[in-house]
Amino acid sequence: MKEVTVDRFPDGAWPVMLTPFREDRSIDWDAVDAYADWLIRMGSAGIFTVALSSEMFDLTPSERVALTRRVVDAADGRAPVIASALAGEGLSVAEAAAGLVEAGAAGVVLIASSLATPEEPDDVLIGRMQTVLERVPDVPFGIYECPVPYKRLLTLETVRWLAETGRFVFYKDTSHRVDVMTARIEATRGTPLKHYNAAISSLVSTLRAGGHGFSGYAANIYPDVVAWLCANVAAAPAPEVERAQRLLSVAEHAINSRYPTSAKYLLAHRAGLPVLPVSRWKPESIGPHEGQPLRDLVDYIASLELPGLRASSRTR
């Protein structure tokens, strides 16, 4: 297989971009534009849209393509945009991938748990990924250990296969185990496959082990601090690095219970973006009682002058 180049896939913060909705739960395209622009201005290396945080299973196939195209247009070449390929409504994964590429995606992410059942071995998973690669040539791919419809963690042998194809450039790792992630980083060293941790509490450890960045909740709301952490883990004073990671861990935990609605609420307060706390996936409301701790957390972090923290005005 032809190896793809990775210069379009920089190290650093890759938010799993939230999808803004209106009150009627239709996509708020103006808010998509504003949010994508903000993520890039806050230092994101790239954007992962049509991810679980984007509520991808609650989007139609046409909406997934339209969302990808809109984020690509908003990025305007300033950062690469990747998106997940899902089968559905008569589309195969390969056909969905081709549609995302046509929409401008720099790479296509495959969902491990959507390509094989829990009972099927990794040989079956590899065979199905091989078919997609053959049907969609010369396109960079990613792999995501998405916890829905179930969480499928890849074996080290499968990770090596991904790296050896030369086609995979993005690995969103959800193992949450430093020993497992370190082994995967070692197994893929020197290949096009880059490792992006999804667990903020262990990010410093994986960056020091040779990982390439972060793709998870914290990057959706604090892309600037995550970007600083990724860029400065080796050079900044250790106490400053640890403080940034600890506060990001607290911020991420604070939005877990009603995510993604809670993240949208926090984002609107932190960034001043026109993003409503509305979700299709988990349509739980955020009222004053639930929202006050989130507002307090944003204001508290702002008062600490956290390394990398930027002003969040909506002006370009």
Image (cartoon, grey):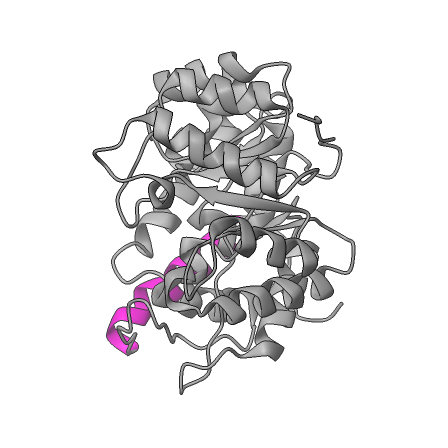
Tell me what residue is drawn at x 43 percent, y 61 percent.
Answer: 56
Quadrant of the frame with the C terminus: bottom right
Task: Where is residue 196? Give x, y as percent.
Answer: 51, 33
Q: Quadrant of residue 288?
A: bottom left
Tell me what residue is drawn at x 44 percent, y 77 percent.
Answer: 276
- Name the residue furthest left: 119
Lateral position of residue 218 relative to residue 191, left or right = left
Task: Where is residue 44? Give x, y as percent.
Answer: 64, 48
Q: In this picture, which residue range is highlighted in magenta? A: 288-304
Image height check: is 149 above or below 119?
below
Check if residue 295 falls in the magenta segment.
Answer: yes
Task: Where is residue 37? Give x, y as percent.
Answer: 68, 63
Q: Is most of the magenta stretch helix, strand or loop?
A: helix
Tell me what residue is drawn at x 35 percent, y 21 percent.
Answer: 155
- Name the residue furthest bottom: 24
- Name the residue furthest right: 77
Image height check: is 57 above or below 81?
below
Tell me what residue is drawn at x 31 percent, y 64 percent.
Answer: 293
Tally of numbered tags: 0
Query: Would residue 208 be seen by someone viewing this image from the given angle?
Result: yes
Task: Where is residue 152? Give x, y as percent.
Answer: 30, 35
Quadrant of the frame with the N terminus: top right
